[in-house]
Image (cartoon, rainbow, N blue to C red):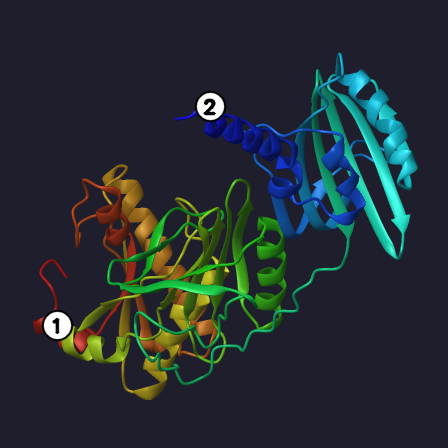
Amino acid sequence: MCLCSRVLLLIAAAFSLATAFAEVLKPPPEMAFLSGQMKTRDDWVAEHSIWNEVKFPPMNGEENPMKRGEYWRMWGDVTTAKDGPDCWRILKPVFLKYGWTVVQERPTNPYNVVARYQQNGADVWTVMDFSWQRAEVKMIKIAPIPINLKLTPPAATPEKMASPEKGDFPYLSALPGSKFRAGSQDKTPFWVTPKGGQREMVASGSMHRAYNLDGLSNVLFVTAYKDALSKAGWDLLDEFNSADAMLLAHFTKNGRNVWANLHNNNDGYTFDVADAGAADLGANLKKDCHVALYGVLFDFNKSTLQPASDGVLQQAVAILAKDPALKVEVQGHTDNVGGDAPNQTLSEARARAVVDWLTKHGVAASRLSAKGYGKTVPVADNNNDEGRAKNRRVEIADPSCAPKQAKGK
């Protein structure tokens, strides 16, 4: 390589470094002046979210006040500074020059500053940490949630999807501006772990959809879908918001029994939906003389029914309503964890709990009986979690169909 080429490369590299802040971090107008005050490092990552939240240090007697709006996180070096406090000594007059007000300075380690900008109709807050020559800047431009998501509740008649691999769910649409990434059908069991219970199978399969939306934060994802799902009649059973965000929702109105797991992470967001009401339990009961009611959920090691059980139990009510002459035995089954006597007692109590629920929902007590089988009739391998979950179940059986029942019943 000739000397002139090397010189040109060095000039290009220097120019790239000088403009890195503006190009990589793309600061908002209220912070644009920082591009001439700090330099970024190659291994520092800038963040931007359409809408997010920032916890601020205690101010005016309020512990960890929260601000929500459009969000930026910016990293840079004040190369002429000696330490954290010196970083702020250098930057403070620049902030004041560009219309910022210093709300609070805390001589902590790292040195912490809160500032506010109120001009041109904007209300912008920033919290900054200074350590050595390094500055971390979090900025929030106060704004209401930018998405007003409305969901259509699942209808009484199950909707038909155009394809197992393509198309939005009719009752669980993507956020505006999202790009469809992938879709698939999963024929493996759909599992949930409700609060107070343990991991259980609630459906035999599910459908998967994946989307991308640049700048989507966990806060925006959870807030938008929690509100929309609640308004559409879904029950929200669980959520978490950490590095990833997750919502577990269940719809049991209109005779439906639909489960949805919504998940957001750095790769995009996904829906996994299981229509547990799609299986014809009545036909399976006539064919096999007994049918498992997966989705009947109890508190851990107890016979207390969880409200999420209502969807599948309503299906049992519908089966009995269609055939007034039908009488069924409600059967409780357990896995092999624990002794024989406790499992027998638990299975009996759970069977009785389901009978009580059915009678309270219109089924004559004379049409129902309860029996516990403990761990004596497994349907799967008890040597793994999945098999044990399948064995923990409630079934309804038709005693008049005894010759066709499975062995051991």
Residue 408 lies, with reference to residue 310, above or below; the image says: above
Q: Residues within 10 Å of mark 2 (few under 14, many from 20)?
A: few
In this view, the residue in front, 315 or 78, is 78
Residue drawn at point x = 39 percent, y = 82 percent? 159
| Amino acid type of the residue that numbered disc 1 sits on in the rendered structure | Ala
Q: What kind of element bears circle 2?
A: helix
The numbered dot on residue 402 is 1
The structure residue drawn at horizontal position 48% and vertical position 46%, both measured from the top left corner, is 266
Residue 1 lies in quadrant = top left
Residue 340 % position (x, y): 23, 41
Q: Position of residue 101 (x, y in %)?
A: 91, 37
- Residue 191: image location, x then y, percent: 35, 54
Residue at x 77%, y 56% (from the top left corner): 143
Proximity of marks 2 and 1: CB atoms separated by less than 8 Å: no
Per the image, the residue denoted by label 2 is 3
Using the rendered view, name the quadrant where residue 164 is placed: bottom left
Q: Residue 285, relative to residue 263: is it above or below?
A: below
Q: Tell me if I can see residue 18 in this picture.
A: yes
